[in-house]
Amino acid sequence: MATRLSAEILKIPLAQLVPSPFNVRSVRTEARIEELARSLEAEGQREPITVYSGTKEDGGKHWIISGVTRYLAASRLGWETLDARVDVTFDSADALTLVKASRLHNDTHQETDLDRAFVAKMCTKTALKFVTP
């Protein structure tokens, strides 16, 4: 009997994908998106993006925590779906965990006190829960 791990890989329509507001990489150059589009066109999708499931209130969208640039490139190519690792361990209301996961997936700098303060402020504005490490 197989044991379900923390994620499964599905083909998800681009129309159901949304970049997560907690994704730490907010700057993507046109050159990088075009470069990735050429790669996707030539070689296909080699690695799934990572998403977490939304809620009924957002129409069941999948929020991209890692792979926004691939999503943008695929959109430019007119692709209809992307392979996505749906991580069921993410809680869409736990902003701090989502920021931490995004940092790990996007290989960015370590979390700082300023980052934690920003997340706490965003949680206050959006009524999300703030969970301390």
Image (cartoon, grey):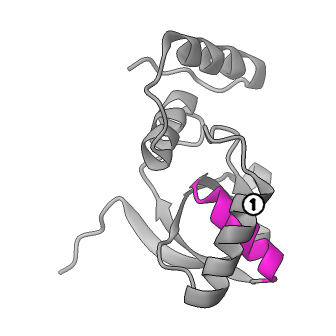
61 relative to 78, above or below: above
Quadrant where the image shows the N terminus: bottom left
Depth order, front residue of 88/30: 30
The majority secondary structure of the magenta stretch comes to: helix
x, y (%) of residue 91? Answer: 52, 42
Circle count? 1
18 relative to 92, above or below: below
Q: Residues within 10 Å of mark 1 (few under 14, many from 20)?
A: few
x, y (%) of residue 7? Answer: 40, 63
Q: Amino acid at mark 1?
A: Ala
Give the side of residue 63 with respect to residue 51, left or right: right
x, y (%) of residue 116? Answer: 54, 16
101 relative to 76, above or below: above
x, y (%) of residue 55? Answer: 68, 51
Give the side of residue 72 with respect to residue 23, left or right: right
Residue at 59%, 24% in the rendered image: 129
Which image quarter: residue 5? bottom left
131 relative to 8, above or below: above
Which image quarter: residue 121? top right
Residue at 47%, 73% in the rendered image: 47
Q: Is residue 70 magenta?
A: yes
- Outermost residue on the left side: it is 1
Quadrant where the image shows the C terminus: top left
Depth order, front residue of 116/76: 76
Depth order, front residue of 72/63: 72
Give the side of residue 103 with respect to residue 124, left or right: left
Residue 17 in sight from this viewpoint:
no
Secondary structure beneath disc 1?
Answer: helix
Residue where numbered disc 1 is placed: 31
Question: In this picture, which residue range is highlighted in magenta?
Answer: 66-78
